Image: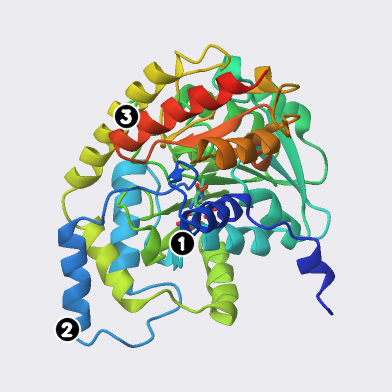
Amino acid sequence: MHLSDRVNALAESETIAMAKKARELTAQGHNIIKLNFGEPDFPTPQHIKDGAKKAIDDNFSFYTPVAGIPELRKAIAEKLNKENGLNWKAENIVVSTGAKQSIANALMCLLNKGDEVIVFSPYWVSYSEIIKLSEGTTVLIHGTLENGFKVTASQLKDAITPRTKAVLYSSPANPTGAVFSKTELESFAEVLKDYPNIYVIADEIYEYINFTGEHFSIGSIPYIHDRTITINGFSKGYAMTGWRIGYMAGATWFANACDKLQGQITSATCSITQKAALTAITTSNEPSLEMARQYQRRRDMVLELLKEITGLKLYVPDGAFYVFPDVSNYFGKSYKDYHIKNSDDLAMYLLNEAHIALVQGSAFGADNCVRISYAASDEDLKEAIRRLKTGLEKLQ
Ligand code: PMP
Ligand code: GLU
């Protein structure tokens, strides 16, 4: 084994690891209900698929420019101007093989060894590992369940050091579903006003799954606009996870750097996918809104059912499709050979004994919690929560 220190230091994505375990148990014949993976259960809307089919028939099968086809970059820029108050043009957009790649592009283009990135925790599992790959250092600030898992401006201020290079968060957030309001984001921007060398990476991949009725982009605040890198994509809002397409929007010099980096690693994403995304972004948003209404209805149903499990501590998530209850009441309890010390033990116990796949909170910087994705059918959700209740009640 002659692996690099870089890859040896890298942890496996725990969301993906849990998906693997759940698939293995399913293959062995177990009936596992999977509420672990963060992806829409809806198929991609028909008109988007038709856009892709047409691209295939038109032989749109060649390499495209690395940063994406001009008409897609232009359509994304128009969307960002219209919906998000971001004053970007096509040249400011770099299309990639997913928001994950755009985050990696951004961090690799931004960080030097030892640069600090302030990450709002609980945080999406890949942030800290991509920061590590980019030789940066993650500085976590923690939101509490009582505050809907949202950090405050004073926490942000206290975390800033001379090495701080960037602030990274998602809103709506994975794994908590927390949504920062305009006022909250303005308070962060107010703090950053005094630090012109700190960049903001705003991951807005769950933009269309927001139950508050208001999505605010921090980059629309004029004095922070040029140093905000906005990340978004099509995976969640348009149910296009497998198509692999996302994008970043930022200052021209920064977009050019991402274009250069991507040009040496993956080049452009799939040409057919880009045409599908162009169809998605230039047609009615109604299918996305309808999916969001379904998620909201399921959130309400799931919360009602979870309330019956008295050991859980709950809050109301405002977006995405996750709920992240505190399960620490079950720590120190046992069933047969299972001794639950932390969220990893609990997730493994629930997988093996109750046959439900969730993700341990430790993957997201919050070991007291587990993440439940409610991007699943009503039937599966009801049965999974019944199993969860029975499984938790067995722990003594
Ligand atoms: N950011 C967050 C917060 C996510 O949950 C995900 C999940 N996939 C991504 C980025 C990556 O999305 P994509 O499928 O576009 O790479
Ligand atoms: N983002 C999703 C999740 O959090 C998909 C898996 C991944 O890309 O990590 O589960």
Q: CA distance from mark 1 to mark 3?
A: 26 Å
Q: Is 301 in front, or is 28?
A: 28
Is residue 169 something that shows in the picture? no
Q: Secondary structure at mark 2?
A: helix
Q: Quadrant of residue 317?
A: top left
Q: Please provide percent x and percent y for residue 295.
A: 31, 34
Q: Please provide percent x and percent y for residue 293.
A: 25, 32
Is residue 62 something that shows in the picture? yes
Tell me the tag on residue 57.
2
Dot in front, 2 or 3: 3
Tag 1: residue type? Answer: Gly
Label 3 Cα neighbours within 10 Å, binned few <14 / some 14-19 / many ≥20: some
Tag 2: residue type? Answer: Asp
Which residue corresponds to the image point at 77% horizontal and 55% vertical from the top-left?
136
User: Is 193 on the left or on the right of 10, as rendered?
Assistant: left
Label 2 Cα neighbours within 10 Å, binned few <14 / some 14-19 / many ≥20: few
Q: Please provide percent x and percent y for residue 138.
A: 75, 45
User: Is 11 on the left or on the right of 393, as rendered?
Assistant: right
Tell me the tag on residue 298.
3
Tag 3: residue type? Answer: Arg
- The vertical placement of 81 against 360, above or below, is below
Tell me the tag on residue 98.
1
Q: Is 287 in front, or is 260?
A: 287
Q: Is mark 1 within 8 Å of ligand 1?
A: yes
Mark 2 vs 1, N-terminal side: 2
Mark 2 vs 3, N-terminal side: 2
Dot in front, 1 or 3: 3
Which residue corresponds to the image point at 41% horizontal and 42% vertical from the top-left?
206
Asked if disc 2 and disc 3 are in contact, CB closer than 8 Å, the reply is no
